[in-house]
Amino acid sequence: MSHGRRCPILGQVLGSTTGPPCVERHKGVYLVDDAMERRLLVATARADFLSSGDDDLYGVPDHVAASWRRSASCGVRPHELASDFHTELDLSSRLVRCAQPIIERLSDEVADVPISVALTDNRARILSRTDSNAWIGRLLDKVYFAQGFGYAEGSVGTNGVGTVLESGESVHIVGPEHFVESLQTFSCAGAPIRDPFSGRIEGILDVSCLSDQSSPVMHSLVRSAARDIERNLLLDRNQPQQALFDAYARIDARCREAVMAVGQRVVMANTMMQTLLDLTDLAALQDHTRFLMARHGTVDDELDLPSGAGVRLRGTRVTVGAEIAGMIVVVTVLADEDRPARLSGRSAAGSGRVVAGTRRPDAAAPSQGTPPRGRGSAAGRTPAWRAAAADIEAALRAHDALLVLGEPGTGRFTLIAELYHLVHDNGRSVALHAEDINQAPEDTIALLLQSDAAPSLYIMRDIDRLTEATVDRLLDAVRDAPEPHSPIYLAATAAETPPNEAPYRALLPCFRASVTVPPLRHRGADIAALATAMLAELAPHRDVRLTRDALRVIMRYRWPGNVRQLKEALTAALSRRPVGALEANDLPAFCHSTPRRSLRHVDEVERDAIVKALNDADGNRVAAATALGLARSTLYRKIKHYGITR
């Protein structure tokens, strides 16, 4: 009789002819041991529970019984496995990076046993699966325990992933303890992986094998491996993140108020902060903090949130060398009597008054524009946008020469023009484009010196595109010009540039106020309303609207081209579906991609072809790979490379 080899980790004999590990052979007769008896008890209790709803689950572990009840209440079907497939996975996340060496080590240790090690995110979606041999992998494929599939308890019942998330504790689910019948072939042990700083569950580590090869050691093994991954998470935290956490911990320890730390990719908040504001206000506050931390070392500001609540925000930027780690803010909700009267720009920003549009002047004779038509760009709920609108209005009321900074496409010019016409009903605005000024700077000065009956605001657009020669000629023309007959009201827009590097730096003494307009990615609370207003402008008197999936795509995209790019995307969607509900597939391909770097034109063409193939195949990657003539692995790699979310 061959006794085979013993696995050094699980202690099982491999290749043995003495029968399954749970059965002992005695004088040619196989006797059922305690483990088999327990499984029979559990199987009987499960059958009674499913047939009659019998809640007397004798012999069933408490955590399994609780999971069965949750599964039944969620409508999980015991004879049908319903696992959803997800494409929006971060396969290069910090969790994956820190778990990979531990998973490789664990797989080596149990290489002699048909076993699989899986990592999921905090939504029970499988990020990776490593099999000790192809045989166990094929069995798990049949139950959709593979990358991309979800194993939440509410979908597939009791299991070693979803039940861990529900209970918050490690579990060992063996055979009939699974709620869904097709999973009872397996045994799985799962343990939570917690963020060492926040304590939140970041993911689940799961070890699965056939149920008759299960061992209690699996549970200890997976818990130990999960702790090792948590240790890697602790060591992996980079210097800026560590500095941000240290500063947050210090302030939170000595402060009894709501405290939040906001970094580029991480947010920490104490309990008071989490309960002080609703989710919409919290998201708006995070956007506003990210906007502020790139521009100010310290802040002490009062602002209105989307819900109407007023808060005081006191913040300090955290840096590591020249790198900005984030900002720590202390937030206090203001009582109505503590809130000062807002600048009228706040109410003006919400009025959404429509004004008339300008036309582009030619180079020889810049034309006098009429008030620009728009969609009420001054309207907005995001604190940074509302604050910018208020500051611009205050400068326009005081007739201060105004410089408005921001990324191209953020609506700087439109915001200035709209607010000017809200403040000065009988005024007019004149647009002066940088390329026109470069061609004839003297003509620009002559236009500014004209005497007008009505007050006029001259808006120089994109002065960061002026050449140094043009700037010098403008300054010479200003010095040589006669005294104007009436005051000159001036505003300008420019991209954010360090003052000592700006080509227009010699013009800075001409301005008395500057305001920075936030990019669209920092205006999360405004995007849905902005898209709806744009649709009304682009398709007047037509029934057009965004579906929930389309709006989700729009909200997730980063919009590097800002409001201008959003308008281009909606225009493209309307060309595909001029009337009715705009679907996610109607949006341009770039909306479904969030690459980590800028793309070349050839990359954009390839990305668009992949998105189209996925749309045509209704998200089926196998069919899309076939249509594109690519290997499935190549398609998966390119989807990850381009950040395609379809």
Image (spheres, rainbow, N blue to C red):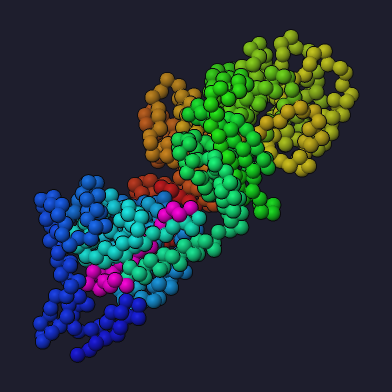
Would residue 179 appear left or right of 235 to someone viewing this image? left
Which image quarter: residue 505?
A: top right
- Residue drawn at the location 28% of the way across and 72% of the way down: 215
- Which residue is at 34% across, 61% downward? 170
Q: In this view, does 192 lie above or below 421?
A: below
Residue at 85 percent across and 25 percent down: it is 478
Which range is magenta? Answer: 198-217
Decide: is 259 above or below 210: above
Asked if residue 469 lies left or right of residue 118, the reply is: right
Compared to residue 261, the image places residue 442 above or below, namely: above
| Along the line of sight, the residue nearer the viewer: 392 or 366 | 392
Image coords of residue 241 (percent x, y): 58, 54
The one nearer the camera, 423 or 252, is: 252
Residue 566 % position (x, y)? 52, 35
Q: Quadrant of the N terminus?
A: bottom left
Quarter of the image for residue 112 reads bottom left
Q: Which of 182 and 196 is in front in this view?
A: 196
Q: Which residue lies furthest to the right in this view?
A: 480
Residue 39 belongs to the span the image colors magenta:
no
Residue 218 coordinates in the image, percent (x, y): 32, 70
Image: 112 above or below 403:
below
The answer to whether residue 391 shows anywhere in this view is: yes
The number of callouts visible is: 0
Q: Is residue 209 magenta?
A: yes
Q: Is residue 540 toward the left or the right of residue 371 in the image?
A: left
Q: Is residue 586 at least partly visible in the picture?
A: no
User: Which residue is at the far bottom?
Assistant: 1
Q: Which residue is drawn at 65% across and 37% down?
A: 299
The percent position of residue 252, horizontal first and vertical second, equals 56, 47
